Amino acid sequence: MSTPEIHIKAEEILNIGAFPITNTLLSSFLIAGILLVMALFVRKNLSLVPGRIQNFLEIIIENILKIMDSVLTDMRISEKYLPLVATIFLFVLISNWLGLIPGVGSFGLNGEHLKPIFRPPSSDLNFTIALAAIAVLSVNVFAVLAIGFKKHFSKFFTLKNPIFSFIGLLEFFSEFVKVISFSFRLFGNIFAGKVLLLIVAFLIPYFVPLPFLFLELFIGFIQAFIFAMLTLVFIAMAIQTTEAH
C-alpha cells in the first residue's frame, strides 16, 4: 500500500502533450470552475427577495466593500476594484481550505508513493508566485489607468535630482520584492500547516488533530484576508493622487 509523503514540489498527475498537469494546477482549475459556476448560478437566479445562497454571498460582498471603503474612502472607487480584491480573497481562501477537506490528501495515484490528485494550490510556490505577480501587475495597470502612464512611472524613473532618482529605483525594485513577499508568506504558512496536519494525523490519529484542523481553518482565512488587504492597500497607494475623494 502506498504511503503519503511530503513534497515541496507539486506532483505531476498527467501530461497533455509536452505540458505537465500537476495536482496543484488541477486543483486550481477545480477552484476556478467552482467560483465560475457559483457566479453564473447566482447571476441567473438574482432576485429582489434573495434566497439562502444569494443572501450568503451578498453578506460576503457587503463586508468586503465595507473593508474596502475604510481604505479607499469612496464607495464608487471600492466598487471599481471589488472584482479583483474579492476574487483574490475567495480564490486564496478556497485554495487554503481545500487541503482540510477529509480525503483530499489521501485520494490519489498509487505507485512507490501516493500521489494525491488534489493538493492545495497555496502549498505550491509556483501558484503563489503567479498569483502575487498577477496582483502586483494589476496594481500597476490600475495606477496607469487612474493617473496615466507618465505620472505613474515618474515615481520610479526621474532625473530631478540624484536622491529622487535613487529612491525611485528603490521603489521600482520594491515591486519585485512585493511578489517575493506575497508568495513566500502564503506558501510558507499553508505548506507548514499541511505538513503539521499530516504529521499529527500520522502520529496521533482520530480526534487529537481536530484542534490543529480548526487552527488551520483560521490561518487559511487570515492568509487570504492579508493577501487581499495588501493588494487593496497597494491599489490605494497607487491611485490616491487622483482618485481619493
Image (spheres, grey):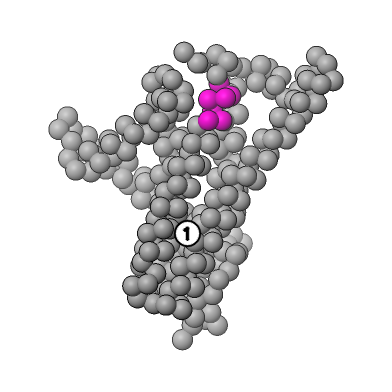
Magenta span of residues: 233-239
Q: Residue at x 68, y 39 (%)?
A: 176
Q: Main secondary structure of the magenta part?
A: helix
Q: Residue at x 57, y 56 (%)?
A: 188
- 29 or 201: nearer the viewer: 201
Q: Amino acid at mark 1?
A: Pro
Find out whether residue 45 is within the magenta segment: no
Q: Position of residue 80 (x, y in %)?
A: 43, 24
Q: Which residue is mark 1?
A: 120
Find out whether residue 237 is within the magenta segment: yes
Looking at the rendered structure, the secondary structure element under dot 1 is loop
Q: Position of residue 233 (x, y in %)?
A: 53, 30
Does the image show residue 95? no
Q: Position of residue 169 (x, y in %)?
A: 77, 29
- 244 or 120: nearer the viewer: 244
Relative to residue 42, is residue 17 depicted above or below? below
Q: Residue at x 60, y 65 (%)?
A: 8
Does the image show residue 175? yes
Q: Residue at x 66, y 16 (%)?
A: 151
- 68 or 7: nearer the viewer: 68
Residue 131 is drawn in which quadrant? top right
Q: Position of residue 72 (x, y in %)?
A: 46, 23
Relative to residue 85, is residue 94 depicted above or below? below
Residue 16 is drawn in which quadrant? bottom right
